[in-house]
Structure formats: C-alpha cells, structure tokens
Image (spheres, rainbow, N blue to C red):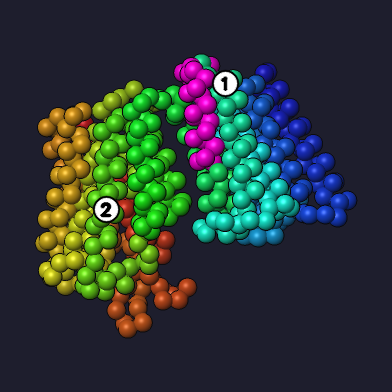
Amino acid sequence: MRNIYGVIISYIYILLVLGLVSLYAKKQKGDPEIPRKLIHILVGNWVFLTPIFTAWWALAIVPLNSLLVNTLNRKYRFIPAMERQDDGFGTIYYAISMLILTSAAFFLKWPTLSFVGLLIMVYGDGLAAIVGKRWGKRRPFPFAPEKTLLGSAVVTGLAFVITLVCLLVFQGQGALRAADTPTVLLIALFTAALSGFIELTGKEGCDNLSLPVGAGLFATLCLQFGETGLYVFLLMCLVILWLALRWQVITATGAVAALLSGQTLYALGGAWLGASLLAFFLIGSVASKLKNNQKKAAEALQAPGSARSWKQVLSNSLPAGVLVWLAYGLGDHRLILPAFAVFAAAAADTLSSEYGMLSNGQVFSIINGKPLPRGLSGGVTWIGLMAGIMGSGMLSLFALPQFGIKGFILCGLLGFVGTLIDSLLGALLQAKYEGPDGRIQEVPVHEGDPVLSGFPLVTNSAVNLITLSVVAALGVLLL
C-alpha cells in the first residue's frame, strides 16, 4: 500500500501545481516565462517524495506519465503555461531526466544521483532563467551569447549549495560511501563549476537533460570513488580539454561529454581504461590536425567541421561506458576487457581514415575493390589499413596491466576488425548524396536532397556507434 499511497500523493501534488500555476498564468499580465519556470521548479520538488517508494514500477509511473503528457502537450498545447513558443524539447528532456535519475538512484541505492541532479536542474536552471533575463546585462560567453553572467552565477552558486547539502545528508546512506567535510566541499565546488558550464552549453532545452544527468553523475562518482588518482585524472582531463577547446579540436558540449565519459571509465573500469580514452583522444586529435592538399579535398566530401561534438564523443565512448556499468552491476571484471577493445577499434578507424586521406595510395572499395574518391566512406587504402593496425596495437597496450598478453592480442585483433567493419558499414549504410560537380559526397548540398545510397539518418557518428557496439558485443562473446 505504501507505493499506492506514494503514487496518489504524487499525482495530487503535480495536478495541484499545474492547476494553480495555469490559473496564475491566465490572470497575470507579466512575463510568460515566470509561470513556465514555476512549473519547472515546483514539479521538480517531486524528488522529495521518491523515498516513499519501495517498488520501481511505482516510482517510474510519475516520470513516464510526465513524458507522455509533455510530449502530447508540446504538440497540442493543452497546458500552455508549460511550453515556450519555440521548437525546443525542454519539457520532454525534463521528464526523461526524472526517469533516468530516479531509476538509477533506486537500483544503485545512490540517492545523490537524483537529488543533486534534479534539484540543480529545477532550482539552478529554473531561477537562472528568471534572474538572468530580468537583471542580467553582461553576456561575456562567446559560445553562449544568449546566456548572462548573472544567470550563470546563479546556477553555479545554487549548484554548490545543493550539492553540499545533499552530500552531507546522504553520505553513508544506501550504498554510498561516507566522506569527510573537506572532501564534500571539494566535490561541491567542482560540481558547481561543471554545472555552470553545462548550463551555458545547453541549446533548445537540452540542458534539462545534460545538466541534471551530468551534475548528478559527476558528484556521485566523486563521492563513491573519490581518491587521489581520480582527482589527478580529472585534472589532466580538464587541462587537455581546455587546450582542445582553445585549438578548436572539440566543442563545448563535446568537452562536457568527454569529461563525464572519462570520469565514468576511470571510476568503474580503472585507471588504465581512463588512460586509454585520453590516449585515443590525443592520438585522434593530432591525426586530425595533419593536413595536405589531398586531405583537404577529401574532407570536402565529408560533413563540415573538425571539432568533435558530443555526438562524436559519445559514438566513440558509449559502448565502453555501457560495458563498465555492466561490469559494475554484474560484478564481472572480465567485461572491462572489451571496453579496451572499443578504444583500440576507435583508434584504428581514426588513424586508418586520417592517414588514408593523407597518403598517395589508391583508394578502393572494401566491398568490390573498385576505385573510390578519397574521403568517401567505404573506401580504404593499404597505408590506411597499416595505420589502423598501428592504432589498434597502440591502444591495446593499455589492456596489458590488467589482462596480460591474451588481453592485448584480443584487443588488437578486435581493434583491426573494427576498422574493417566501420568501412563496410560506411559503404552499405552511410548516407551519400550527389555533389554540385556530380561527385558523390556525404553531406547534402541542400536540405532535403535525395539520398543516392544508404540511409539519411546514418551519419559517420552513427556508423562509429554501430561499429563499436559490434566490437563490444564480439568482445563479450569471446571472453
């Protein structure tokens, strides 16, 4: 009955909030953003009711129904106070965040995941929009020209207070470790800085997903796995990502995804796996910066922009992230080995592609051996394949300390197989279009141009994700 009561109380509370704020929105003549943010903040307080639930099905009913209602309301606007007059998916991301974080906190018994993440979103992001819009004047952020300094300061300050209080309250509860006060203060400070940066990078409401998940995950992993090695690793990541941002090797959203990926891999998979991610990023970044006229012409056939976005970061790191979470949840250390193979395959594919475009060798189709334009997915060169073997071998070295020579050999083989799979999928599935000069290329000249081959939604990032997921699955089967 406790779970039934929890569901009933939750619905009474949320319906009461929606009703009262909708009534206020009809009567008030001021800024329409205020009612929207009131709902944003008040509905988010539902997280305080989550300790009532002892069954996941009851806990998940509220965010699942919110996801359904928010999706329908975005189209039909039957609760106008909830939506902006734009095309953002903020309310949908809001419900997804509630579902992900409360579910993860329930199963892992890490309450800081949901409380830190959701409260920073509802209070930090919610009040920042109101305060920044009303009183904020300075907009000093070139990558976020619409965000104010005051609004960012509100997010950062509230994130510090929320993280500090939540960690002090929940440490030692459930499956969480206890930490001393100086450590909690340090975690709160770092989480606040990260939260402020994530909020700045959010576009079209996506910070309703990236901010709570990023802040909750970062603070909880620091509390649960915090040690000198992890903090040194995070400092190294920050330095490398700062340089990468300056050199335009990665975007701001890509940097956030890379930092959280690195922290997760180090915390759950160990120091050598975290180092493997850093090595892949450095090797790939250096290779992408090497240019000659051949490579510039080849890159013209591909999607523009060399800076890695969050999509590119996750397409290369997500399969390894899934493996380390499975290893942690199932208590099976062996599952970390295929995660090393994922980065071996990612490095092999990157070096194969980059050095293939730099070389003078003949480009031929991996399917039928016929000549192809340099830079087109599905084309390979002998020099590129040799570079792929080298990249796979270099990244496989990181598996040696934990899994020995057998782990090194398995990762090396899977890494090279991965680059072959990537080329095969690129030839068969990746979308290709007719260029202005009649040549085949991977980016349409105009939006809506017909696809000559492949599928419109299958980009290079999608091919990378599919390839590395196949490599991960093969690695698990070969354990």
Q: Give the range drawn in magenta.
A: 173-195
Point out which mark residue 248 bears: none
Amino acid bearing label 1: Leu
Residues marked 1 and 2 touching at CB (< 8 Å): no
Q: Position of residue 403 (x, y in %)?
A: 18, 29
Establish if 202 lies above or below 4.
below
Numbered-mark total: 2
**Where is mark 2, residue-wise?**
284
**Dot 2: few (<14), some (14–19), or many (≥20) neighbours within 10 Å?**
many
* Residue 35 seen by the camera: yes
* Residue 105 seen by the camera: no
| Residue drawn at point x = 63 percent, y = 36 percent | 158
| Residue drawn at point x = 51 percent, y = 58 percent | 143
Q: In which quarter of the image is residue 55?
A: top right
Q: Is residue 176 magenta?
A: yes
Q: Quadrant of residue 381?
A: bottom left
Q: What element carries label 2?
A: helix
Mark 1 / mark 2, whichever is N-terminal: 1
Amino acid bearing label 2: Gly
Q: Position of residue 204 (x, y in %)?
A: 58, 55
Q: What element carries label 1?
A: helix
Establish if 69 lies above or below 270.
below
Task: State the CA–CA distance, disc 1 to disc 2.
Answer: 41 Å
Q: What main secondary structure does the magenta stretch of the protein show?
A: helix
Q: Where is residue 470 in the image (x, y as percent from the top left)?
A: 28, 45
Q: In which quarter of the image is residue 354?
A: bottom left
**Where is mark 1, residue-wise?**
168
Q: Where is residue 337 in the image (x, y as percent from the top left)?
A: 24, 33
Q: Is residue 27 magenta?
A: no
